[in-house]
Image (cartoon, rainbow, N blue to C red):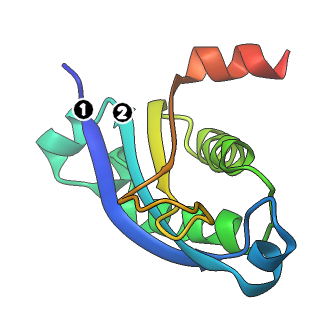
Amino acid sequence: MKNIIYLEGLEIYAKHGVFEEEKHLGQKFIFDIECELNYKKAMLNDSLIDSVSYGDIAEDIYFIATNNTYDLLEKLSYEVVKYIFNKYSNIERIKLKINKPNAPISKIFKNCGTILDIRREEFLEILK
């Protein structure tokens, strides 16, 4: 059985980007996240203790995104995933999408950004 909690469209104003203006002025970032875990116990006993609160996940993403400044979304993605894996031992896989809708691109576009889809085992291999 695959169990996923998700949060879609979390908008956070933060200061990430390669250009100094992005770091100084900031801009909107939109986060979508899926966290795979076994919440069979939560289904049976109706207790949040046996799952993960998407409200807490939203606060975690906000904390990482607003208390740090990175050039690349790849680094921001890594830091968010690292924080969540370290905080929640029951999360087995994370899929994190970061959309940067106001990226300084001289063409018309709807969305751009990064997607990191990683299992805990893969993440631990990166740390070695």
Location of residue 127 in the rendering, given as x and y in whole percent from the top left corner: 81, 22
Residue sitting nearer the eye, 115 or 33? 115
Q: Residue at x 15, y 42 (%)?
A: 43
Task: Name the amino acid type tagged 1.
Answer: Asn
Residue 23 occupies quadrant: bottom right
Q: Residue at x 67, y 48 (%)?
A: 83
The local crowd at label 2, few if under 14, some if 14 to 19, many if 20 or more residues have their Cα within 10 Å, is some
Residue sitting nearer the eye, 66 or 4? 66
Q: Residue at x 52, y 61 (%)?
A: 100
Image quadrant where one finds the N terminus: top left
In this rendering, position of residue 78 left or right of residue 99: right
Location of residue 99 in the rendering, given as x and y in whole percent from the top left corner: 47, 57
Image quadrant where one finds the C terminus: top right
Residue sitting nearer the eye, 60 or 11? 11
Residue linked to disc 2 = 36
Residue linked to disc 1 = 3
Q: Residue furthest front?
A: 107
Judged from the image, the secondary structure of the residue bearing numbered disc 1 is loop
The local crowd at label 1, few if under 14, some if 14 to 19, many if 20 or more residues have their Cα within 10 Å, is some
Dots 1 and 2: beta carbons under 8 Å? yes
Residue 78 occupies quadrant: top right
Above or below, 38 relative to 84:
above
Location of residue 28 in the rendering, given as x and y in whole percent from the top left corner: 53, 76
Comes first in the chain, label 1 or label 2: 1
Q: Residue at x 60, y 15 (%)?
A: 121
Judged from the image, the secondary structure of the residue bearing numbered disc 2 is strand
* The disc label shown at residue 105, or none: none
Q: Residue furthest left?
A: 44
Task: Name the amino acid type tagged 2.
Answer: Glu
Q: CA distance from mark 1 to mark 2?
A: 6 Å
